[in-house]
Image (cartoon, rainbow, N blue to C red):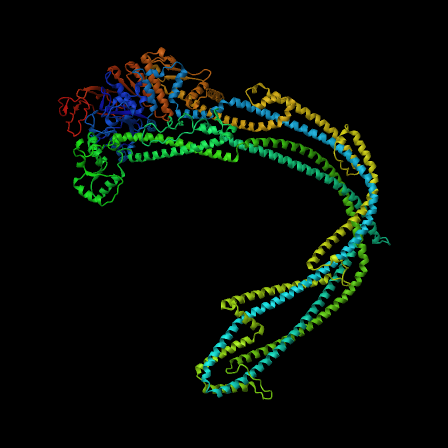
Amino acid sequence: MYELSRVRLYSIGPAGARYADTVLDLRGVGEPVPDPAPMQAEFFEEEPVGPPRRPAPAGVLFLENGGGKSVLLKLIFSVMLPGHRNTLGGASSGVLRKFLLADDCGHVALEWQHTLTGELVVVGKVSEWRGRQVSNDPRKFAEAWYSFRPGPGLGLDSLPVAESTAVRPPVEGASGAQGRRRTMKGFRDALTEAGKVYPHLEVYWEEIHDRWNEHLGDLGLDPELFRYQREMNADEGEAAGLFAVKKDSDFTDLLLRAVTDTRDTDGLADLVSGFGNKLGRRAELTAERDFTAGSVELLGRIVEAAGTRARARDIHAGAERRTRTLARRLTARAAEERSRAAELAQQVTAAAHTVTEAEQARSRSSLVAAELAFRHASLALAAAEKGAAARRRELIDARTLHSAWLAAEAVLRHRAAGDRSARVAAAIREAERDAAPALAARAKAAGDLVRALHTAAEDGERVANEEEERSRELQETAESAHRDATAAATEAQRARSEIGHLRQRLSEVEQETAEAVRAGWLDDTAPDADPARAALAASDAEKAAVAAWDQAREAARSTADRAKETAAAESRAELAAARAADAADAAENAYEAERRAAESIAADERLTDLLSLAPPAPAVPSPRSGAPATDGTTGEPDGSPRPATAADGTYPQAAAGSRGGPLRTSGGPLTVEELDGFADELRELLDRSVSSAERQLFDLRTAAADDARILGALGDGGLLPPGPDVLATVEYLGEHGIPALPGWRYLAQSVDPVDHAAVLAGRPELVDGVVITDPASHARARDVLAGAALLPRSAVAVGTSAALLAPVPRPGAGDDADVFLVPPNPAMHDEHAADEERHALRARVAARDEDIRALAARLAADRAIGARLGAWRADCPQGMLAELAEGARSARQTAQEAQETLTEARTARAEAEEAAADAARVRDERQDSAQRARRAADALAGLAFRLRERAAWQVRLRELADEAAESEARAASCLERAKAADEDRRAAQRAGDDARRTARALRAERAEIAGAPESLPEQDADAPRSSLPALREAYRAASQLYEKVGVGADLRAEQARAESDESAALAELDRLTNKVRTRAAQLLEGTDGADGPSRQAAVVRAESLVQMLETRASEASEKLGRLRGEAERLAPADGDAHTELPGELVPVDAEHAQALLRTATGELASCTDTLEAARAAHAGLLHAHRATEDAAGGFDETAALLRDLLRDHHHEDETPQPPEPYPGTLEEARHSAAEARRSLRGCAGDLSAAESAVREASDVLVRHANATRYEQVRTPARQQIRELPAAALPEHAAKWAEAFAPRLRVLTDELAQLERNRDTIVDRLRGLVESALATLRSAQRLSRLPDGLGEWSGQEFLRIRFEEPDQATLAERLGEVVDEATRAAVKKNSDLRRDGMSLLLRGVQAALEPRGVAVEILKPDAVLRAERVPVGQMGDVFSGGQLLTAAIALYCTMAALRSNDRGRDRHRHAGTLFLDNPIGRANATYLLELQRAVSDALGVQLLYTTGLFDTTALAEFPLVIRLRNDADLRAGLKYISVEEHLRPGLPQPDPAGATVHGEITATRMFKRAPLPEQPTEGPAPEPSGPQPAGAAPDQPV
């Protein structure tokens, strides 16, 4: 906590009590600082002597009455309590403005010192008149607050209030400020600059009151205490008025209001306000919850009892229905048995004929099917053979084509070689005329050699062909032998397989015989045991068992079919009921969903506003003008535009309302029906509202952007910026070293404000242009700007300062007298006007920002509700809600009908399933018997058959052994023959290959011989033949001779090459067949033979075709083999056909045969089934005829007994169709009848008990609804329960229970949440109440007086007594307080958010009930007797001085409590108390001593003002500052200055300290003369006080 150390007032105060520069120093009087913090002293400050001391704990400011004491307090309080409404003394709001003259920039600075560390903090206020003119307009009065922590660079003495400040003031109380006073902006700039240079100063500047109050709290200064001091100083000496209370509880309320932090109570108030409405309805909700919960329970009992009754009724009705049905079924069974016995005799005869006919039909059908299968196989084989032949032809053609394309290149080469050879031969013929004999000889030799070679080649080819033919014959022989060997091996293997099969059969027969003996089916001990006779007996037993099983199965089938039908009917009914229920739920959900969506949309108040008011007309705000709008719109106080009206005074919505119907005029949210009717109009209104809001928002944001740009340019201070073209010009000139300033800047800085108007009128172009401060640079500036090409968008004048300040021409001297100047914005050249513009801009920007936020929020809400409305209207067109509601009602009715049908179906199914279960049990038993008999019969019949076949199997076994041996020998012989044929074939193939190779070599040699004629003459048969070597030598000799006498070697070589190429091509062609050569020549004539790539592509295609056809041929061959085997398998064993087919069954082709075969196969299967069915039917009829006649009488007798049991026989004719006959036996029927009688008697008793339970539950529900504690429950359901008769309640119980369940959950959750909220509020309030009670106890504890006061020593000045309640009682009482407050708020429709403190005080009063609180205070008197007086009786018992002293003591206690509440319990200091002239009322010594004792004990610094120089009273204070008010006759003002600081006595030495050896024998005091006045250029400073005349230099006094 801080104590006031010094007060400095500069250039402030009214004319009769001004403070030029006055410092009130309270330092160096108190106790030493206990824990001084290190501080850096000023550079020229003297070294401190001893530890730092605290300010005076109490002091008096003495000034004559009427001298200005109240002015001083008002100024001090204006720093700690900002705002004109908080002015001390209850003066008018404009009193502080009277303390400031036109030229003043007033300062009030308070220096506070920390009580523990001695750290200093300065808080101050600066104020001035804008424009240096006194005005009645409060906006012209500027004020701001600041704070910093003194240190090197800045302190209270060195405040930059003037242009210069002395390092140290000349004398104590004198001013150190020198030079001209700074303006508020200059002071702020200097203060800010000091804060930047010295960050430890922590400079803070603020202009908003609330933020300044928060900052004071952050510093540790409590401005709230000054509010109470303001009330204590409302009248001079009337400090006790604050504590003038009538009751003790009023004092505790005052004390708690002063001490309790409002943030806690505000939080409580917000919490209560948030749940106030619901808490106010807590009792009503609780009653409704209890009624609903009880009703749900009782309705559940009724529903359960009604369900039990319905089930009992259904069970009883089902029992009667089952008994009646059983009787009717038994009767039907008897009639059926009688008719069946008559029919069975006829059916047995008919069944025998049917069996015979079925056997004949099956035989015929079997033969026809076999013949058709053979015909189909034969036709398919013929078709496959034709297809295979066609595939082979296609393959041959494809191979020929492929060979022809391969030979095409050889044909081309032969043609080319022939042409070249002809051309060379033509060239040589001329040269060979002379070499004709040699040529003829060579030609003859060549012809003989060629002929011989040709003959030898033909012989070799002939031999090769013969060998190849022989190889093929041998290969066929080998393949035939291999096939014969394979067939023989197959036959041998088949014989061995059949031998193994027969041996297995024989062993199986032996095993079956042994098993039959073990099973008892065959008796091996009897000598004449025959398996055949045993098989016949088992067959008869099987037929009897099967007949019984068939009868039981038929009965089980009929009952199962009946059960299935009833189950299917139940499933259909259940499905129908489920679908109906789902449809009803879906319809209801769809209706509820659409209705909830509509309700959520209709709950928006915006729609109600749109239907009740017209949409707002768009308004375009002016960005920089505060004038009212003139565009047809008017503004509301909150900034939102009011809807504009048309010229006839109607809203624009009226037109829309006329289209869609009458407008809505009732209050509250829209209903769903209204929303459905006005949806289109609402969408149109929302669209128009959104469009209008978007335009208005765009205009507001545009204006905000303009103001933000101007405000950004203004910054924290300065003038409005000049235009961009001017700034660009100045910047460009500065870059070229030409000093220049904007005209507005030069006007503001260098021209007297008095001459601004004249300069503007005379040189407006230069004021808005550029001023060159150096006249010598004018010409260079012209050249620089001429070459700059800045291209400004406005006319920018450039001139010197002399041109700007030149004499203004007379008005008549101008060329154009009609030109005038629009008054410019003074903020361009006046800082005060700039500040006003800045404040106006900030206020306008803040207001506009609020408008933008509100408008944006409304726009977003309109868009959202518009989108929701559009989506809902798209999903739910007009009238759809009514259709959905009607559909939901009809669907629910259909669901109820389906549920009733389902109940009936379930009963019928239960009866049918019971009957089916009985029939199935009988069927299973008889099935087991039949299966056992069938297994025995089958086993014996098979055994007898296999025993008969055993002899034949043994004979066949021997025959098969012989056949297997023969087949194996034949297979070995065939394999040897095949091996020999393979060896001969390989030898023949090798010989053929050798001959073929020799022939190819001879033909190659023939191709190399040159000069041989193309066509050789036939050789004479009689001519002798020469060998090939001789002919070769003759040819060589003839060729050499010809070369010697022939043409040149080059030509011969060319001819030889040509002939060689031709011969090679011819030889290649000779290897091809004529068909291939001819096809190749034809292909070359086509387009595919035109070039090489085409021929290659044709070769690839031909090769692909060959491969494809080869694959197809292979597949066709495989298929042909399969079909041939199938035909052989299906061929008839004897004859050419199985049977003769009629004309319509003779197949034409394979497909026709396949169709006929399928038809015949189906007929054969049908005939087989018919035969089997006929045989089974004949056997069953024989057994059934014997048993049917015996059962008819027994069923009639049992049915008669059941009919006698039923009381009402008229129901027998109600069934429209005859019942199913009873499926069981006679014994089973009698057992079922006995069970039916017992069930019927039990169901009747259960039904009676269920009806009694329903009546009792209904009576309990009616009594519950009529209970008096539910009178405030106004629900329709309660009224209906009370009005309806008890018998009708079960019909509605289920619906009510279904409707009550969600309401109960909602109420339970809401009350649970409400209880949690209430408990939270009560806990919060209890915490505050307990804290308040602790505060009251702390107040009593803190008021304990120190020692040395007689009987008052150690006494508690303030005593507060009360009884503390326990926690349970406190919680209950506080809950009642919360409930009462919320009920009252709901009843009065008030807001609890503003009344948190009152709620806390009511909670404290409730906690202290019933005795309340008693507050007593000690009565101050001369002898200090311990007499206590109730605080409410102070005004009646105490004198004025005593009352004032008690008020001071109570304030000190309250201040100490606030200090403790803020965590400063250990630092016993509670601030400073300012009182205006209390000594005039309480100047008795004992009263002052008591005031000092209480303030010292509680740590409160006392500062009094007085006009009475009572030395006895003043002697009680350690510091008296004497002020004087002197008149300045020249200025007509009075200035208050410090005359002297009176500090009675010196500080007493500490007795426990060290002994001081020495004493003061004499003192001298020097008085320094004031410094001589120094001349200044500005106006003379105001005198700081009266100047003594004839002051001399420092002289001893």
**Snapshot quadrant of residue 400:** bottom right
Give the quarter of the figure containing the N terminus.
top left
Judge from the rendering whether residue 684 lies leftward or rightward of residue 12; answer left or right. right
In this rendered view, identify the residue nearer to me: 1083 or 549.
1083
**Snapshot quadrant of residue 455:** bottom right
Residue 911 higher or lower than 635, as above or below: below
Give the quarter of the figure containing the C terminus.
top left
Residue 878 higher or lower than 1513, as above or below: below
Q: Residue furthest top?
A: 1436
In this rendered view, identify the residue nearer to me: 84 or 796.
796
Image x and y of residue 434, in percent: 46, 87
Judge from the rendering whether residue 1201 lies leftward or rightward of residue 608; answer left or right. right
* Residue 1294, visible in the rendered structure: yes
* Residue 1430, visible in the rendered structure: no
In this rendered view, identify the residue nearer to me: 727 or 283.
727
Image x and y of residue 393, in percent: 62, 67
Residue at point 70%, 63% (across, down): 1125
Image x and y of residue 1046, in percent: 45, 86
Judge from the rendering whether residue 1075 lies leftward or rightward of residue 1533; answer left or right. right
Image x and y of residue 950, in percent: 80, 59
In this rendered view, identify the residue nearer to me: 1385 or 73.
1385
